[in-house]
Image (cartoon, rainbow, N blue to C red):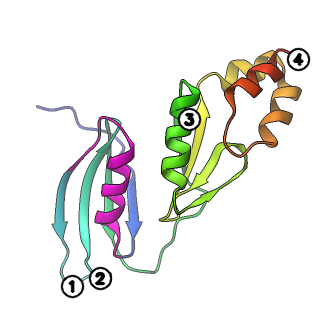
Amino acid sequence: MADLQKITPFLWFDGRAQEAAEFYVSIFPDSRIVNSSPLPGVQAEGAALVSFVLAGQGFTALDGGPMFQFSPAISFVINCETQEEIDHYWFGLSKEGAQQPGGWVEDKFGLSWQISPVQLESLLAANPDKVMEALLQMKRIDLAALETAANGE
C-alpha cells in the first residue's frame, strides 16, 4: 500500500483551480497534475477539483466560489539553496503577482509564498542585527548581501 500523506494543503479558488495547478506545476520540479474532475452545480464557473504534486508534496485545489479569498496569514515557504533557485521561484511566482519585502511574493491567484535561503538561520545566528537589517531592506533575497551582513561587513 502506498504511503498516505498525513497533511495535504487544500486550496480554495473561484473558477481558477485548474489554471492555478497548471501554473504551479510549471514552476516546481518533481511536479504534476494527478487528477482533475469537473464539479457540476458549484458556484464557480468551470468548477473543478484538482489533485496535484509540487516538489513531491501533494495539494488539492477546489473551485468553491467567491466566498473565500487567500490572505498572507497562510503562506508556503520554499527553502532554496542557491541564488539561482531563489530567483527562479521569486520571478516565477511573482509574475502577474506582487513582490513583498523579506522574500515574500503573492502570486497572481493571491496565494503567499516565502522564498527563503536554507542558510538564513545560520546567517542570523552569526550576526542577527546586521542580517535582519539587510533582510528587511530587501524584497528579492540577495544571498550574497546576507552573507556579507553575517560577516559584519
Task: Compute the Cα span from label 4 to label 1.
Answer: 60 Å
Q: Residue at x 39, y 51 (%)?
A: 9
At label 1, counting other C-alpha atoms closer than 10 Å, the crowd grade (few under 14, some 14-19, many 20 or more) is few
Please tell me which residue is depicted at 24% across the width and 70% down the height of the picture. 48
Marks 3 and 1, Cα distance to the nearest angstrom?
41 Å
Which mark is first along the chain, 3 or 2?
Answer: 2
Mark 2 or 3: the one toward you: 3
Image location of residue 34, percent across then percent down: 19, 49
Q: Alpha-carbon distance for marks 2 and 3?
A: 34 Å
Magenta stretch bounds: 15-33
Q: Residue at x 37, y 51 (%)?
A: 24
**Mark 3–mark 4 contact, CB under 8 Å?**
no
Residue 86, numbered circle: 3
Mark 1: which amino acid? Gly
Mark in front: 1 vs 2? 2
Relative to 106, residue 81 above or below: above
